[in-house]
Image (cartoon, rainbow, N blue to C red):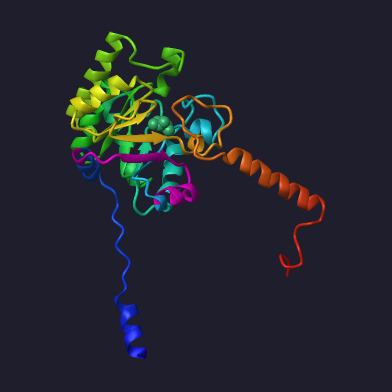
Amino acid sequence: MEQQSQDTEIHVHAAPIRRVTTRRLSDMKKKGQKIVCLTAYDALIARILDDAGVDVILVGDSLGNVVQGHDTTIPVTLEDIIYHTKAVIRGTRRSLVVADMPFMSYQVSAEEAFRNAGRLMKEAGAHAVKIEGGKRVADAVSRMTEAGIPVMGHLGLTPQSINQFGSYRVRGTSEEEQQQILDDAHALAQAGAFAIVLEKIPLSLAQKVSQAIDVPTIGIGAGNHCDGQILVYTDMLGMTIDFSPRFVRKYDNLHERMHNAVTQYCNDVRDIAFPSTEESY
Ligand code: KIV
């Protein structure tokens, strides 16, 4: 009896955890399986997302707003992204981790973009990088993909161009803009991008782009015809209070719940209700 239970224990193995790959994302598009993506900026949150089954974690330059308290993503540096990507990588086992290339880390030349992408892969341990733009960054995308660096594109609303556009309005509303976005998507696909983020464009345009290219599209404010969806994790958990565009669904109200918990802690410390005898040595 004793021997039997030992044998049983020996034969119980946990299933090996396989890292999501860019090829897997491509297969998911072919099979019509939606790709789940969220941002993360540290190991603690990355672990929660990874455990919950998020396919792709983006270390977005949105960390400029979320973590650093800036109004835009412009001040974020390559060193910032390297630091946060390292932390996110430590928190994951299954998710594919994509590091966002910050403003001015890829615009100067395809060569500089290539070198900086290499740092994100080698120093930070990213599995892929993301850059904003279409035709104008196609050379950089080709240079990287030819060297084995997977690249995610980003079209539609591109926050790094905020000073050029002057607003975060919906993109692709005019025929000219729609054609531009379609052409850019083709250029990125041809240059070898493994996925393309479509941000804040009409759902009919996102559908057109998703049908026109074999590369998976990842929508944010782009409707449900995209091959996957991404949100900033602090938005979907209701931690952000001063930003609630219609494309964000709040799955919790963590700002209020955390506020209440911290208020309770303040009260308990002031009332000498914490720590109790059981919480002391
Ligand atoms: O920086 C970011 O978080 C992003 C996503 C919103 C796509 O680019």
Q: Position of residue 137 (x, y in %)?
A: 27, 24
Q: Nearer the viewer, residue 261 or 251?
A: 251
Q: Nearer the viewer, residue 102 or 53?
A: 53
User: Residue 161 at x, y = what percent?
Assistant: 40, 19
For the image shown, how many numbered marks are present on the structure? 0
Q: Quadrant of the N terminus?
A: bottom left
Residue 207 in the image: x percent, y percent?
Answer: 26, 24
Looking at the image, residue 156 lies above or below residue 214: above
Q: Is residue 189 left or right of residue 73?
A: left
Q: Give the residue at x 41% y 53%.
A: 51
Q: Is 259 in the magenta?
A: no
Q: Is residue 43 magenta?
A: yes
Q: Residue at x 56, y 37 (%)?
A: 239
Per the rendered image, the range of residues in magenta is: 30-50
Report whether residue 95 is seen.
yes
Q: Quadrant of ligand 1?
A: top left
Q: Quadrant of residue 206?
A: top left
In the rendered image, the vertical position of residue 48 relative to residue 62, given as above or below: below
Seen from the viewer's position, the closer of residues 99 and 107 is 99
Image: 191 above or below 167? below
Residue 183 is left or right of residue 121, and the answer is left
Toward the right, the furthest residue is 271
Residue 227 in the image: x percent, y percent? 28, 34
Residue at horizontal 47 percent and vertical 33 percent from the top: 249
Q: Specify the quadrant that holds the C terminus.
A: bottom right
